[in-house]
Image (spheres, coloured by chain):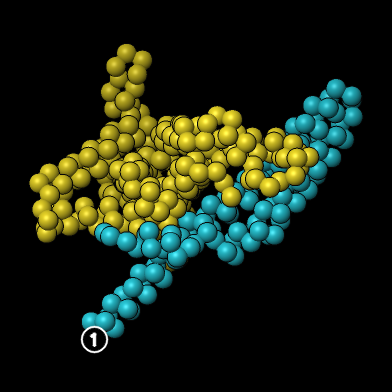
Chain colours: A cyan, B yellow
Amino acid sequence: MSGKGNGAGTRYTAARTTAAEGRAEGLNVGWTVSGYLVSGMLAYGLIGWLIGRAVHVPLLLPVGMLVGLAISIGFIIYRYGVQGAVTQPQTSAKAQKEMTGDR
Amino acid sequence: MTGDVTALASGGCHIFSGCGFPAPGLQDFEWKPLFSIGSFDFTKPMLLAILAALVVIVFFWVAFRKPKLVPRGMQNLGEIAILGVRDQILRPSLGRRGDSYLPFLVSLFFFIYIMNVMELIPLFQFPVTSRIGFVWPLVFIVYFLYLYLGVKNQGPWGYLRNMIPPGVPAPIYIILVPVELLRFFVFQPFTLGVRLFGNMFAGHLLLTIFTIATWYLLSLSVGLLYAAGSFALAIFVFLLETLVTLLQAFIFTTLTATYIASSLEASH
């Protein structure tokens, strides 16, 4: 009976561990992705604005923002889409063991 | 708080009496000084921040003053608190190697939580973190630690290089530099601070609006029905805020833990 109980307990702890890990990973990835979207637009919008100011072409600001957005989206797909960082968080058996180890 | 709105609302300013709704606003976040030392004004949020720090210090000091192998009383509570932060915040991000940061994260979590929860405690009734001046120093501490650990563990050049994940082709690498710099030095610290501040600010404003509206709508007519609706919403927002206070402390600390984790080793 105790064996059964321990098994259930371990599964429960492992499930909670995975949930907590997923939560932390999701929070981090979510904010990183929104960070890329906003920063890409701002960074290249700023560069576009500066160049546009120098060459007197105001259109370079929105162009820069669009380019920045495209770069951000491309990089997000490259980093989190292709590599599958969201669907496959770095949860390894070793990491789980680390977390559910001694109290 | 200047108290103008509260005074107006409590002074018989009701619906159908020709009195406009004394809407709360930014003035409810401004406080008259409790006392002044020269040009320095000591206000209620400062008092609450000191109280929050004292609560955290005294609680953990009392809990672990004489630790026993089999915990009892306050030590039990203290252990639940510490294990909660360790298992839900620290270990999911850092694993066991991050245990040395547990005291920092526990202090940070409970300090923010107590400051937030001041909103819901009668007489205090103000979340300290709804004044952004109390949030930026916390962001600064976290960011300083984040940068320090990153540079210490990866070296200044390695740290900058590792901001962009390895394996990215050279031209893309160059294209990403401005994005990454802006994200790292502007967006990330800005959102870390504003997220906490904004949630507490909005929560306090909502709570004030519905509380004052309940009083304002009170009258011996259909206004009583409006007041009941507003009161129900005030209770709902109160319950929501009990969750938000905890959640915001949790998010701030979890993100701190993930930042520390990314400083300890290069991103993947």
Percent coordinates x, y for residue B68 in the rendering: 10, 53
Q: Is residue A101 visible?
A: yes
Q: Residue at x 35, y 18 (%)?
A: B40
Vertical placement of A23 versus A47: above or below? below
In the rendered image, which quarter is residue A19 located in?
bottom left
In the rendered image, which quarter is residue B58 located in?
top left
Percent coordinates x, y for residue B3 in the rendering: 37, 37
Could you say whether the residue bearing mark 1 is in a helix, strand or loop?
Answer: loop
In the rendered image, which quarter is residue B186 located in?
top right
Q: Residue at x 50, y 44 (%)?
A: B265
Q: Quadrant of the N terminus of chain B?
A: top left
Tag 1 residue: A1
Q: Is residue B238 visible?
A: no
Task: Return the residue found at the far top.
Answer: B38
Q: Residue at x 71, y 46 (%)?
A: B168
Q: Residue at x 34, y 63 (%)?
A: A100
Is residue B106 or residue A12 the one in the foreground? A12
Vertical placement of B129 versus B250: above or below? above
**Residue B248 falls left or right of residue A64:** left
Identity, as a three-letter code, of the amino acid under mark 1: Met
Is residue B126 or residue B57 the one in the foreground? B57
